Amino acid sequence: MVDQQPDFPAFSRGIRQRYETALAKGTGARPEAPFCIDAGNGRVFDAMQQVRGALAGLLAIVLSIASGITAIFTQGTVFWVMLAITALALGRWLLYRATSRKLGSSWLQGARPFPAALVMGHNSVLEPGNSIVPGTMLVDFGGTPNPERMQAAAQACFALAQAEEVPAHHRAVREWLRTEMQRARFRRIQVPKDLVGSDSCWLVSFRFDRKSMPKGYIDRPIWFVLARPQRDESAELLPHEYWVAAG
């Protein structure tokens, strides 16, 4: 497993180089863009906006059909109102599609592999299946990641979410984790240095995409994710072909 590498930082750098080479050549597997993308200037393209865009597309289809049926019977005011609403819904969907593709492409070019320790995920990904569910990783954005330290910190963070009495500077992390357990926001928060011994570790939301998992389910504590440092956004699993033997 990756956490048994004799020189883990060098191993991590090798994975990044392998991925960057494939990205430059346009080869290799690519994950989908994350649910939440930091668009800059304080703007965040999150899961809710994606839902709204999908609904706008569905509404445009329904209204197009309704407008066609209406046109059979009348060319009056009702028809033109429905046509105008259809155009607005279609415009909203096209804008969503263009924004989504632009931000997704920008994210893919800027995201790089980083090691991550599993903090929590839905029980359904402990065994083979088809579901894609959210989870939380402790990601080390530094240059000298330590897998043992990361695992210990991930366990400490999970325990923190269950604790009633915690130090004041840990409360923000505890509340963030508790909210993540109830509803995934696909964002991130920095982990206090006394929990991990480093200023470079963050709790980051992501989704378990089984296509990117070595065996299609959780089988190890240390993974690699694609993420952009210094961005309040989610991450995606790095396809396993870059860091473990297929299967």
Image (tube, helix red, strand yellow):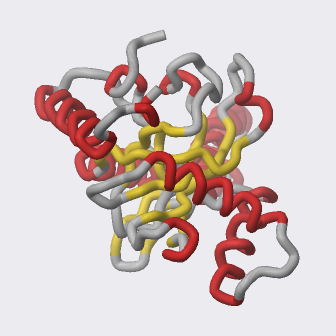
Left or right? Give the position of 173 relative to 229.
Answer: right
Q: What is the x, y in percent for residue 229?
A: 34, 62
The residue sitting at 48% across, 37% down in the picture is 223
Q: Nearer the viewer, residue 16 or 222?
A: 222
Q: What is the x, y in percent for residue 60?
A: 60, 43
- The quadrant where residue 225 appears: top left
The residue sitting at 36% across, 20% down in the picture is 241
Q: Nearer the viewer, residue 45 or 134?
A: 134
The residue sitting at 45% across, 64% down in the picture is 201
Residue 147 seen anywhere in this rendered image of the structure: yes
Left or right? Give the position of 81 relative to 229.
Answer: right
The residue sitting at 58% across, 31% down in the picture is 220
- The quadrant where residue 217 appears: top right
Left or right? Give the position of 15 relative to 209.
Answer: left
Residue lying at the far front of the rendered structure: 6
Q: What is the x, y in percent for residue 184?
A: 69, 56
Q: What is the x, y in percent for residue 62?
A: 68, 38
The answer to whether residue 215 is above or below residue 157 is above
Residue lying at the far bottom of the rendered structure: 168
The answer to whether residue 182 is above or below residue 126 is below
Residue lying at the far right of the rendered structure: 164
